[in-house]
Amino acid sequence: MTTILIIDDEYLIADILSFALEDEGFHTVVAGSGAKALDLLERDRPDLIITDFMMPGMTGLELAETVKSLAAHRSTPIMLMSGAQAYMGTERPDLFAVVIEKPFDIDQVIEKIHALFGPRD
């Protein structure tokens, strides 16, 4: 089962994403900060990371740089979901496989995730 780590300090957004992705058959893990997400990386070994940009303590950009510096997670795709800072993600294709602007359309998010992992069986 594909595991997706969702990082957003807005718990309502994280919960909406989690419920929608679980309905699609994905396993989700939620973290409210970049630091918590880094703690979960080794335990949960996510196949995809979805992160917000603006979070206290660590931005989504800083999180992505840290994740990509870890040999075990260098190839883990990261999706950035952001409002005003989305352009920063598009400028860093080395870090972000997908950039989605907030407010987002959940169907678009699901479509992008399926595109990353190929058709479902």
Image (cartoon, rainbow, N blue to C red):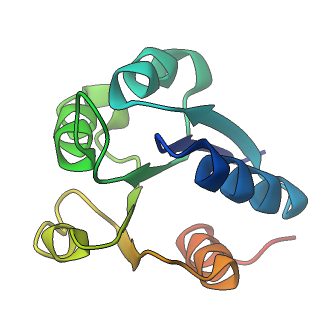
**How far across and down, in percent of the image, does residue 107 sit?**
70, 83
Question: Which residue occupies the foreground of this view, 41 or 106?
Answer: 106
**Residue 53 occupies quadrant:** bottom left
Q: Residue at x 35, y 31 (%)?
A: 34
87 with respect to 44 (left or right): left
Name the quadrant of the N terminus. Answer: top right
Q: Residue at x 61, y 55 (%)?
A: 13
**Residue 108 occupies quadrant:** bottom right
**How far across and down, in percent of the image, does residue 19 sit?**
81, 53
Q: Residue at x 46, y 40 (%)?
A: 9
Q: Residue at x 68, y 58 (%)?
A: 17
Q: Using the image, determine if residue 113 lies above or below residue 13.
A: below
**How far across and down, in percent of the image, does residue 66 sit?**
20, 32
Q: Using the image, determine if residue 23 lies above or below residue 72.
A: below
**Residue 96 occupies quadrant:** bottom left
Q: Using the image, determine if residue 6 lies above or below residue 71.
A: below
Q: Using the image, determine if residue 76 lies above or below residue 38.
A: below
